[in-house]
Image (spheres, rainbow, N blue to C red):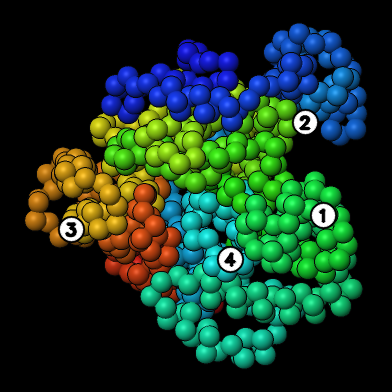
């Protein structure tokens, strides 16, 4: 892709919007962002990582200390047999050697898109958990599906109230223990569960996903189980081995959790002595809170075990949010790498006519290079681990991000460029190591050249029926194809008009924009003759009949559409709605016999899929 016009701070003041109209960010915005970004050290290019591939010229001659302990000589061109991975040059610089392409599936497959918190069984504690994920995976395998796509499972602060949005985690490296299936944790006893029968009944009967109640109860039972496990020599030895392999990253995470339980979830409000991971008071806190820290390490161990059991050999694409909470653990660990008093979002586009502010502070590009790309590497690796797939939310953020100065609206931002070639090659390296398929969510304002760069690395595009003017049979093979997303209307919500009413009730979007947006989506749904007065079931069938014609490698099927749910999981731009708290309208146990499942799969893959669904075994247990 051609190089855009950017200043020495990496700010792209002039840009083209989603309607191909030229735009220019305000001078005041640019000035504020320049101050935040600052100037890199004069010797940055002598210290920044070198990211390359076999066969490429580096201009370097050096002895290389490889990560496996061996040494190699580099004489400009990287040999074809040079080890892939993270190495060190003689001058101390990091050398990252990438294959340049991600793992790509060879055959087309379909799979469910799942908001795991919403996929509740009658057994689970008012929120879908990793045993429920295992159940969904086994059912998907039985039906002939090849993957699952789940919401981000990353951890938030271990306090209440719990952060509801999966896209504003405290970390992108570790997972949320609220998803643990407590009954499957070693050390949990029947008596632990029986004494909480009334609380469990309340959680299971709630109309919304009650994260606060679920986490409060789970934490109590899990802490008791941890205390028992600590007395079991066998379990203690297994934990110690896992802990040593996980390294300092999990120690830092667990320390932050213990600090959050003592001082609250916002690390910016903590005492100065512990406000950063490298602050002087942290070692003393660690010494005084060893058991609490070990508990949070143990939780991550249990999550790792349960996730691997839940995914089995099936690809589960995990979602990587664009950023993290500025008050969270990753910000605590890498405070110097993040921009202060800035958040990221998107300018106005087809998805949202007033723009979006996602609340996460961005990584400063030159500081990310100075940090050897480690915050990015650990986030990619931690999200892929144990699941075999990755969806990168707003993948355009690897090229440029819309920075919004504090106190400004999303219309008052500007684009800041990132070292996309390096970041994409790191994704390819991690994908190659994990054998993981990677999907880039390239919806909204996509600049020229982005999709070509993704395709060159084997990163699948993301094509959505509601967004595309071309019919699905014209979509690319190298893509994940879907009807909708968590931020867009379900088929039933669109068809009945209830989604438009939901938007008007919960956002500041102009009614004309909402109405015209709905009509544009309806035109796509009706383009092959669907009658305006057709029942909702026919509308769902038509949407997935169209999707089934796509040649794309991955065909994504929303569970909400299978049960004709009218409410989408999230309406962007509002905090007044119960976003990320809406349970699926059908318990997990009833999905195999739900008529909507058979109709949808028949539309997507033909009658044989419907027959398989109708003959499905029971789900649950």
Quarter of the image where one finds residue 462: top left
Tell me the distance, in whole angstroms, between the alpha carbons under discs 2 and 3. 53 Å
Residue 602 can be seen, yes or no: no
Q: Which mark sits nearer the N-terminus, 2 or 4?
A: 2
The reply to whether the C-beta atoms of the residues labelled 1 and 4 are less than 8 Å apart is: no
Residue 444 vs residue 434: left or right? left
Quarter of the image where one finds residue 579: bottom left
Pointer 1: what residue? 282
Q: Residues within 10 Å of mark 4 (few under 14, many from 20)?
A: many
Pointer 2: what residue? 86
SS under mark 2 = strand
- Residue closest to the eye, 378 or 186: 378
Where does the image place residue 169, in percent across and percent down from the top left? 57, 53
Tell me the distance, in whole angstroms, between the alpha carbons under discs 3 and 4. 33 Å
Q: Which mark sits nearer the N-terminus, 2 or 3?
A: 2
Pointer 3: what residue? 496
Where does the image place residue 163, in percent across and percent down from the top left? 53, 60
């Amino acid at each position: 892709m051609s190089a855009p016009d950017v200043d020495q701070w990496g700010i792209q003041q002039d840009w083209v919007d989603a309607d191909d109209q030229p735009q220019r960010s305000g001078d005041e915005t640019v000035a504020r962002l320049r101050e935040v970004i600052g100037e890199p050290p004069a010797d940055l290019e002598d210290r920044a990582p070198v990211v390359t591939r076999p066969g490429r010229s580096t201009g370097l001659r050096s002895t290389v200390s490889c990560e496996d302990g061996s040494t190699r000589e580099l004489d400009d061109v990287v040999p074809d047999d040079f080890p892939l991975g993270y190495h060190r040059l003689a001058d101390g610089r990091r050398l990252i050697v990438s294959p340049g392409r991600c793992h790509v599936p060879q055959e087309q497959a379909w799979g469910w898109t799942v908001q795991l918190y919403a996929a509740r069984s009658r057994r689970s504690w008012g929120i879908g958990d990793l045993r429920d994920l295992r159940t969904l995976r086994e059912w998907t395998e039985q039906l002939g599906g090849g993957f699952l796509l789940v919401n981000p499972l990353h951890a938030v602060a271990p306090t209440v109230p719990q952060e509801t949005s999966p896209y504003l985690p405290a970390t992108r490296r570790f997972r949320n223990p609220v998803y643990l299936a407590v009954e499957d944790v070693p050390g949990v006893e029947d008596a632990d569960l029986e004494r909480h029968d009334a609380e469990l009944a309340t959680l299971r009967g709630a109309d919304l996903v009650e994260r606060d109640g679920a986490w409060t109860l789970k934490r109590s039972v899990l802490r008791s189980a941890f205390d028992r496990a600590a007395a079991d020599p066998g379990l203690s030895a297994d934990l110690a081995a896992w802990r040593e392999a996980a390294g300092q990253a999990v120690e830092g995470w667990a320390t932050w959790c213990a600090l959050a339980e003592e001082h609250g979830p916002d690390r910016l409000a903590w005492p100065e002595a512990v406000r950063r991971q490298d602050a002087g008071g942290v070692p003393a806190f660690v010494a005084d809170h060893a058991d609490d820290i070990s508990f949070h390490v143990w939780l991550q161990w249990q999550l790792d075990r349960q996730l691997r059991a839940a995914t089995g050999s099936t690809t589960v694409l995990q979602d990587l949010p664009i950023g993290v909470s500025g008050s969270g653990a990753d910000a605590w660990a890498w405070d110097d790498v993040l921009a202060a008093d800035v958040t990221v979002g998107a300018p106005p586009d087809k998805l949202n006519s007033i723009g979006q502010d996602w609340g996460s502070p961005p990584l400063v590009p030159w500081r990310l290079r100075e940090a050897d790309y480690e915050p990015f590497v650990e986030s990619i690796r931690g999200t892929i681990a144990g699941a075999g797939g990755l969806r990168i939310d707003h993948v355009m953020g690897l090229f440029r991000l819309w920075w919004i100065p504090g106190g400004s609206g999303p219309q008052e931002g500007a684009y800041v460029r990132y070292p996309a070639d390096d970041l994409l090659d790191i994704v390819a390296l991690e994908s190659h190591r994990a054998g993981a398929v990677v999907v880039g969510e390239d919806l909204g304002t996509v600049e020229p050249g982005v999709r070509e760069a993704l395709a060159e690395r084997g990163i699948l595009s993301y094509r959505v029926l509601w967004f595309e003017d071309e019919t699905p049979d014209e979509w690319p093979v190298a893509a994940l194809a879907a009807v909708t997303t968590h931020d867009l209307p379900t088929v039933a919500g669109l068809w009945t008009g209830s989604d438009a009413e939901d938007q008007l009730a919960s956002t500041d979007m102009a009614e004309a924009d909402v109405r015209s947006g709905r009509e544009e989506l309806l035109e796509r749904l009706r383009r092959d003759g669907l009658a305006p007065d057709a029942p909702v079931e026919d509308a769902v069938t038509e949407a997935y009949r169209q999707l089934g014609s796509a040649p794309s490698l991955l065909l994504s099927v929303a569970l909400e559409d299978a049960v004709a749910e009218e409410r989408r999981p999230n309406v962007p731009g509002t905090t007044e709605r119960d976003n990320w708290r809406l349970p699926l309208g059908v318990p997990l146990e009833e999905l195999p016999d739900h008529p909507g499942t058979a109709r949808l799969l028949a539309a997507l893959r033909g009658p044989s899929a419907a027959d398989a669904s109708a003959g499905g075994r029971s789900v649950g247990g």
